[in-house]
């Protein structure tokens, strides 16, 4: 993925329509499509966070109700799918060693299920088992044991019912999971920013996505931070904040800037860098998270999402991925007396050294090839695109990779297509070794890695702690639903 420069987005703005920032307060849709905006000038409300459900005495026992709800987005009442009536759903806050019980009630009028993205927990039974189907008007009990040595950081939950994942996430079904562990960082405050995108039609319903947009990976016409349009964050100059940022967009790649503030990346996807590293952008593929330390400057700053070029489908019948203009996601209003001592220096003692699988013995290697191609003619799919891994679309009855528990493997992820694909593996995190010709010097751990168009990525994985059957897939959820997913069985 590559950030498109702010100069070029102006010339790209006409492709498929674009979000336009207006008058500093809101977003309008420029009208190349038949869908309506939520409304212009609807931003500017005070930043809020989803309700928090926190574990106590080692247990979090909660009910999540998935339903179609009327909610207010950007000052307009619309319909969306929600957990417990809120968009995003409640934030689950847990600690390593906790037991988590979730009773999922499905009032959607269609099947669903639940996935805890990034958690290192069992994929079996009533734990993080994405093969379960929860029928409408039924209730299902999920139960997870968070290991004592589980890393801290931001994770998230969302439905994972094959064929309906993109629709249900796009419509509003997602929420954050924070795993807390004391890391002795003195911050002024912590914030959670769940970033998503959505499109409403003129009736205020979630818009229907065209086949072309599914193939490209749909991008919503409005972007939300915790369900809000361009909210305002209040802070004092010199405040030192920790942000947990979640990319819950169905397909959109994020490249975030906060010009004027000092941004230090503390880690991604539940892994920590050896020491926080100053960065100018926060880059998050769909599904990815970042923990960022923010030193607030004097004066206002805007959190911007720059357009990202994630490739195209070339001459094939797929719309161009859309992110073509810069969007103001949030504004920071800075006022008051400067904090007495800027707290940038109050960083944590170095965390435990990160595991580095390059120093361990490999037990195997394999290559997985992500591809896009025209579906066979006469199959009712004329002109349609197929999304495959190793030449197959997803089959719930086929195990694609059999791995022995305890194996340490190197996987070469090859992308032969002209679009980037964010590759996600459930349960077992991946150590990123190299992307194309660029080798990582540090131990970099991710649960989603970007595999750029016509390129390859090398990762290593330790298949430890759990056995069972789970999945890997493209986290452009339209591609996952389109078949770019496979099954792994660890035994
Ligand atoms: Cu975030 Cu298989 O999912
Ligand atoms: Cu996942
Ligand atoms: Cu993809």
Image (spheres, rainbow, N blue to C red):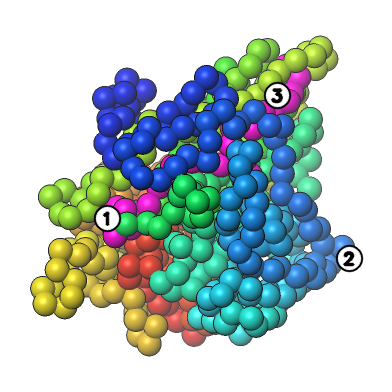
Residue assigned mark 2: 57
Q: CA distance from mark 2 to mark 3?
A: 33 Å
> At numbered mark 1, what does the secondary structure look like: helix, strand or loop?
helix
Rendering coords of residue 36 (x, y %) = 44, 42
Residues at marks 2 and 1 touching, judged by CB atoms closer than 8 Å: no
Of 93 and 163, the residue lying toward us: 163
Foreground label between 2 and 1 = 1
Q: Earlier in the sequence, mark 2 or mark 3?
A: 2
Asked where in the image residue 233 lies, by quadrant, the reply is top right
Residues at marks 3 and 1 touching, judged by CB atoms closer than 8 Å: no
Q: Is mark 2 within 8 Å of ligand 2?
A: no
Side (left or right) of 90 relative to 156: right
Q: Earlier in the sequence, mark 3 or mark 1?
A: 1
Establish if 6 lies above or below 329: above
Of 444 and 50, the residue lying toward us: 50
Establish if 408 lies above or below 154: below
Rendering coords of residue 345 (x, y %) = 72, 24
* x 75%, y 70%: residue: 63
Rendering coords of residue 119 (x, y %) = 61, 64
Is residue 163 in sight in this rendering? yes
The tag on residue 344 is 3
Rendering coords of residue 336 (x, y %) = 80, 14
Residue assigned mark 1: 212
Instruction: Give the magenta part as a residue range.
Output: 211-237
Is residue 446 in sight in this rendering? no
Q: Residues within 10 Å of mark 3 (few under 14, many from 20)?
A: some
Foreground label between 2 and 3 = 2
Asked where in the image residue 127 lies, by quadrant, the reply is bottom right
* x 47%, y 47%: residue: 202
Q: Residues within 10 Å of mark 2 (few under 14, many from 20)?
A: few
């Amino acid at each position: 993925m590559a950030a498109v420069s702010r100069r070029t987005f102006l010339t790209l703005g006409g492709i498929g329509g674009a979000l336009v920032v207006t008058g500093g307060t809101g977003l309008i849709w420029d009208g190349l499509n038949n869908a309506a905006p939520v409304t212009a000038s609807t931003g500017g409300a005070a930043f809020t966070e989803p309700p928090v459900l926190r574990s106590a005495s080692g247990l979090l026992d909660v009910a999540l109700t998935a339903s179609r709800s009327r909610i207010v987005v950007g000052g307009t009442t619309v319909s969306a799918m929600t957990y417990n009536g809120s968009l995003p759903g409640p934030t689950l806050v847990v600690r390593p060693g906790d037991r988590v019980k979730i009773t999922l009630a499905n009032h959607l009028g269609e099947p669903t299920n639940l996935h805890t993205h990034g958690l290192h927990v069992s994929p079996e039974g009533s734990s993080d088992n994405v093969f379960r189907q929860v029928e409408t008007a039924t209730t299902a009990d999920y139960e997870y044991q968070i290991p004592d040595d589980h890393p801290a950081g931001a994770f998230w939950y969302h439905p994972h019912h094959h064929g309906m994942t993109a629709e249900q996430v796009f419509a509003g079904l997602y929420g954050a999971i924070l795993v807390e562990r004391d890391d002795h960082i003195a911050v002024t405050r912590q914030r959670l920013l769940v970033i998503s995108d959505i499109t409403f039609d003129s009736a205020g319903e979630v818009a229907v996505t065209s086949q072309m947009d599914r193939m490209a990976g749909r991008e919503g016409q409005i972007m939300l931070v915790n369900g809000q349009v361009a909210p305002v964050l209040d802070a004092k100059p010199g405040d030192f904040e920790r942000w947990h940022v979640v990319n819950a967009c169905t397909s959109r790649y994020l490249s975030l800037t906060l010009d004027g503030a000092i941004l230090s990346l503390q880690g991604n996807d539940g892994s920590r860098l050896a020491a926080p590293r100053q960065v100018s952008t926060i880059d998050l593929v769909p599904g990815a998270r970042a923990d960022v330390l923010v030193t607030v400057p004097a004066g206002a700053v805007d959190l911007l999402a720059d357009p990202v070029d994630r490739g195209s489908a070339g001459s094939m019948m797929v719309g161009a991925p859309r992110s073509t203009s810069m969007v103001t996601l949030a504004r920071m209003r800075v006022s008051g007396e400067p904090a007495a001592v800027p707290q940038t220096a109050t960083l944590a003692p170095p965390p435990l050294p990160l595991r580095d699988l390059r120093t361990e013995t490999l037990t195997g290697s394999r290559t997985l090839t992500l591809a896009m191609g025209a579906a066979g003619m006469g199959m009712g799919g004329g002109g349609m695109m197929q999304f495959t891994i190793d030449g197959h679309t997803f089959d719930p009855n086929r195990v694609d990779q059999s791995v022995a528990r305890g194996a340490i493997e190197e996987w070469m992820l090859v992308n032969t297509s002209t679009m980037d694909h964010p590759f996600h593996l459930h349960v077992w995190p991946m150590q990123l070794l190299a992307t194309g010709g660029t080798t990582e010097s540090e131990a970099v751990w991710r649960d989603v890695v970007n595999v750029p168009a016509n390129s390859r990525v090398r990762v290593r994985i330790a298949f430890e702690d759990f056995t069972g059957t789970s999945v890997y897939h493209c986290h452009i959820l339209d591609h996952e639903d389109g078949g770019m997913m496979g099954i792994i069985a660890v035994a």
